[in-house]
Image: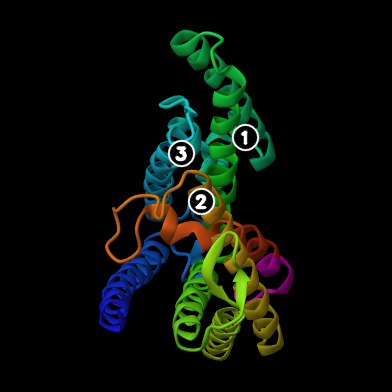
């Protein structure tokens, strides 16, 4: 059993390292393309983060398909393709306002209204009145859970910059890794036995320390936030990230599934990779808006 655990950890570590390297390269290249890494040129760009926008849209769409599969296990129908289109529009909401000359809030409200009308029409044409409230309900939940929460990642990138984006993602994922390792080695006291029996308070502590360490390293190297702010950010992002991870576990347990899919070796599905970032992304956006040094933004 110990060998199987070690082998899974090595598999997961390899996959996670490759994904982290690819994401870092993407964010840096994307920032170079639109001038966000050079403060003198960033303000001249009409739109930013085009590459990341495409990647976010693709990931959220795939996540929506996995959530549709989980919902189907409970007899619920996510109303695709309307819901998939809505996920793309909402998750990339920060990208479009400069192009369509609308305030962000108005753009989101208009898109939400149009998608809601589309969901009702799709329900009527495909299913009539059968399961209308349940199907529209799970579809709206999918839009909020993946589309609305996922949008804040692009918001961090566009409004706070590439370095803040890397800090956020690396802090969250290092917390995941720290929690996994310390939980395996030291875990005794269950954190949430009804939802995720494998999570422990010792794992939470390890994740918190990892997130704080990454945050302080970024603060020291790039100066985008102070060291004291980095301490607060690391603690909060680790705790919120673990709770965000639990939120997806609730959905999987209800659907009687261990993983959302098998798309990502060593992890499971797309949802299993991004779950800890969903509820932590809005916090990161607000935190950087309040704590980020003006010269770094």
Camera-nearest residue between 105 and 208 = 208
| Mark pair 3, 2: CA separation | 27 Å
Q: Name the residue carrying label 3.
A: 88
Q: Residues within 10 Å of mark 2 (few under 14, many from 20)?
A: some
**44 sits to left or right of 268:** right
* Residue at 45% across, 88% down: 185
Q: Name the residue carrying label 2.
A: 253
1 or 2: mark nearer the eye:
2
Q: Name the residue carrying label 1.
A: 107
Q: Position of residue 190 (x, y in %)?
A: 60, 74
| Mark pair 1, 2: CA separation | 35 Å
Q: Quadrant of residue 285?
A: bottom right
Q: Is residue 46 visible?
A: no
Model colouring: rainbow
User: Considering only order in the chain, which callout, 2 or 3, is on the residue closer to the N terminus?
Assistant: 3
Q: Position of residue 14 (x, y in %)?
A: 27, 75
Q: Quadrant of residue 64?
A: top left
Image quadrant where one finds the C terminus: bottom right
7 drawn magenta: no
Q: Position of residue 276 (x, y in %)?
A: 53, 63
| Mark pair 3, 1: CA separation | 13 Å
User: Considering only order in the chain, which callout, 2 or 1, is on the residue closer to the N terminus?
Assistant: 1
Disc 1 secondary structure class:
helix
Disc 3 secondary structure class:
helix
User: Considering only order in the chain, which callout, 1 or 3, is on the residue closer to the N terminus?
Assistant: 3
Q: Position of residue 257 (x, y in %)?
A: 42, 49
Image quadrant where one finds the N terminus: bottom left
Residue 92's place in the image compared with 112, above or below, is: below
Magenta-tinted stretch? 287-297
Q: Residues within 10 Å of mark 3 (few under 14, many from 20)?
A: many
Which label belongs to residue 70? Answer: none
Residue 107's place in the image compared with 52, above or below, is: above
């Amino acid at each position: 059993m110990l060998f199987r655990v070690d082998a899974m950890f090595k598999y997961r570590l390899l996959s996670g390292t490759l994904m982290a390297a690819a994401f870092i390269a993407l964010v840096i290249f994307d920032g170079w393309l639109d001038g966000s890494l050079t403060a003198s040129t960033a303000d001249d760009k009409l739109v930013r983060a085009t590459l990341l926008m495409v990647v976010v849209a693709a990931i959220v769409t795939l996540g929506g398909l996995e959530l549709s599969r989980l919902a189907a296990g409970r007899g619920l129908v996510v109303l695709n393709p309307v819901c998939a289109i809505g996920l793309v529009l909402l998750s990339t909401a920060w990208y479009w306002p400069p192009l369509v000359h609308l305030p962000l809030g108005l753009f989101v409200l208009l898109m939400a209204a149009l998608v809601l009308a589309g969901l009702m029409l799709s329900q009527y044409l495909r299913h009539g009145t059968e399961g209308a409230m349940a199907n529209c309900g799970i579809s709206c939940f999918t839009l909020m859970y993946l589309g609305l929460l996922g949008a804040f990642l692009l918001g961090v990138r566009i409004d706070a910059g590439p370095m803040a984006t890397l800090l956020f993602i690396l802090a969250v994922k290092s917390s995941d890794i720290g929690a996994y390792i310390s939980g395996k080695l030291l875990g005794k006291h269950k954190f949430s036995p009804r939802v995720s029996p494998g999570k422990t308070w010792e794992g939470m502590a390890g994740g918190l320390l990892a997130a704080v360490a990454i945050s302080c390293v970024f603060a020291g190297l790039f100066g985008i936030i102070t060291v004291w702010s980095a301490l607060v950010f690391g603690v909060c992002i680790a705790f919120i990230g673990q709770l965000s991870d639990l939120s997806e576990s609730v959905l999987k347990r209800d659907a009687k599934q261990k993983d959302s899919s098998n798309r990502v070796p060593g992890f499971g599905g797309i949802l299993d990779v991004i779950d800890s970032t969903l509820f932590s992304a809005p916090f990161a956006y607000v935190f950087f808006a309040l704590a980020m040094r003006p010269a770094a933004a």
